Image (cartoon, rainbow, N blue to C red):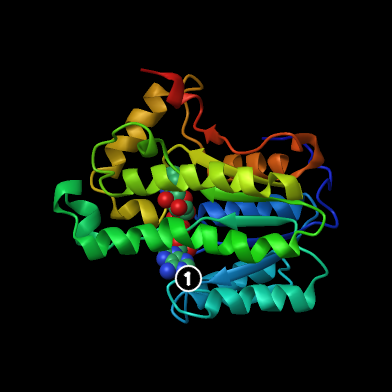
Amino acid sequence: MNATIRPVLTGNRALVVGIANDQSIAYGCAKAFRTAGADLAVTWLNDKAKPHVEPLARELEAQIMMPLDVAQPGQLEAVFEEIGKRWDKLDILVHSIAFAPRADLQGGLLDCSAEGFAKAMDVSCHSFVRMAKLAAPLMKEGGTMFAMSYYGANRVVSNYNVMGPVKAALEACCRYLAFELGPRAIRVHAISPGPLKTRAASGLKDFELLLNEAAQKAPLGELVDIMDVGWTCAYLATPFAHRVTGGTVYVDGGANIIA
Ligand SMILES: NC(=O)c1ccc[n+]([C@@H]2O[C@H](COP(=O)([O-])OP(=O)(O)OC[C@H]3O[C@@H](n4cnc5c(N)ncnc54)[C@H](O)[C@@H]3O)[C@@H](O)[C@H]2O)c1
C-alpha cells in the first residue's frame, strides 16, 4: 500500500496487548496507530517474551512497557494503574490474545477438557471483558476497543475446534460491551482477520491448508497481512468511524461472503 498516512490519531493514547513478535497482529495494530500519530503502551507476556517484544516497543517509541499475563492475578490491574498515573486518558484498547492448551486445541470439541475449555475462554474471551471494565473509566473522552476474532466463530472451520465457541463468545461480548459502553461514547469492535501465519496460528493443525484456501476463496484473491488489520483498526479508531460500533469487521479480502 502506497498511501500517505496523515497523523489522524495524534493525541490519542493506545494500549496494545498481544505482541509476541513482528508477525503478531497486535504489532500491525501498534505500528498503524503509531504511524497515525498515537502514543503507545505495549505489554509482553513474561520474561521469556520480553527480549522479543521490548525492541519492537522501543522502535514504536512506546511510552509505557510492562509485563502482562492476564491469567496472573493483579497484572492487568497494574497495567491500568500505570496508565492512569502516566496518561491523562486512554483512547484505544486492543485485545489481540488467545490461548488454549495444545491437547485441547488440537482435539475435537467433544474431547476438550473442562479445564482446557475454561482456560481458553478465560484468556481469549473473558480477559477482554476485564480489560474493558478497567479501560472504560480511563476513556474520558470516549474511545475504541478491539478484540480479534475469526470466521470460525460463525461457521465451522476444520481444526479450529474449541476456539470456534470461544470466538463466538468473544463476538457476543463485543456486542454487549458496545451496548453497555455506547452511552459513554466508547465503541467496541470484533475484528475478524483472514488467516495469518503467526505464532498462535502455528498451534492449529493443517494451518497451511487454511491459508491456501483463504487466498483462493477471497474475491480480492490474496491473503491479508498484519498491516491490513492495523490500518482497519486505525480507521475505526478515528472520528471518521464515530458512529460504527458493536459489529464484526472482516479483514479477509471478502472471503466471508463466499459460500
Ligand atoms: N493468525 C491468524 O490467522 C488469526 C486470524 C484471526 C484471528 N486471530 C486472533 O488474533 C489474535 C492474535 O494472535 P496472532 O495470530 O497475532 O498470534 P500471536 O502468537 O502473535 O499473538 C498471540 C498473543 O497472545 C498472547 N497471550 C497468550 N496467552 C496470554 C496471556 N495469558 N496473557 C496475555 N497474553 C497472552 C501471546 O503472548 C501473544 O502475544 C488472537 O486472538 C488470535 O486468535 C488470529
Left or right side of 101 for 121: right
Q: Is residue 18 visible?
A: no
Coordinates of residue 253 in the picture (x, y in percent): 51, 27
Q: Residue at x 79, y 35 (%)?
A: 240
Quadrant location, ligand no. 1: bottom left
Circle 1 packing at 10 Å, graded few (<14), some (14-19), many (20+), is many
Quick one: 91 or 202, which is closer to the camera? 91
Left or right side of 139 for 17: left
Coordinates of residue 151 in the picture (x, y in percent): 40, 35
Q: Residue at x 43, y 79 (%)?
A: 48
Coordinates of residue 22 in the picture (x, y in percent): 53, 59
Q: At numbered mark 1, what does the secondary structure look like: helix, strand or loop?
A: loop
Q: Residue at x 74, y 36 (%)?
A: 241
The quarter holding residue 99 reads bottom left
Quick one: 241 or 204, which is closer to the camera? 241
Up-down relation of residue 108 to residue 211 (above or below): below
Q: Residue at x 57, y 35 (%)?
A: 247
Count of marks placed on residues: 1
Placement of the N terminus among the 4 image quadrants = top right
Does mark 1 have its CB less than 8 Å from ligand 1? Answer: yes
Placement of the C terminus among the 4 image quadrants = top left
Farthest left residue in view? 111
Up-down relation of residue 38 to residue 156 (above or below): below
Quick one: 136 or 192, which is closer to the camera? 136
The quarter holding residue 8 reads top right
Identified by mark 1, the residue type is: Val
Q: Is residue 219 visible?
A: yes
Left or right side of 186 for 94: left
Which residue is label 1 attached to?
70
Coordinates of residue 9 in the picture (x, y in percent): 80, 50
Up-down relation of residue 159 to residue 249 (above or below): below
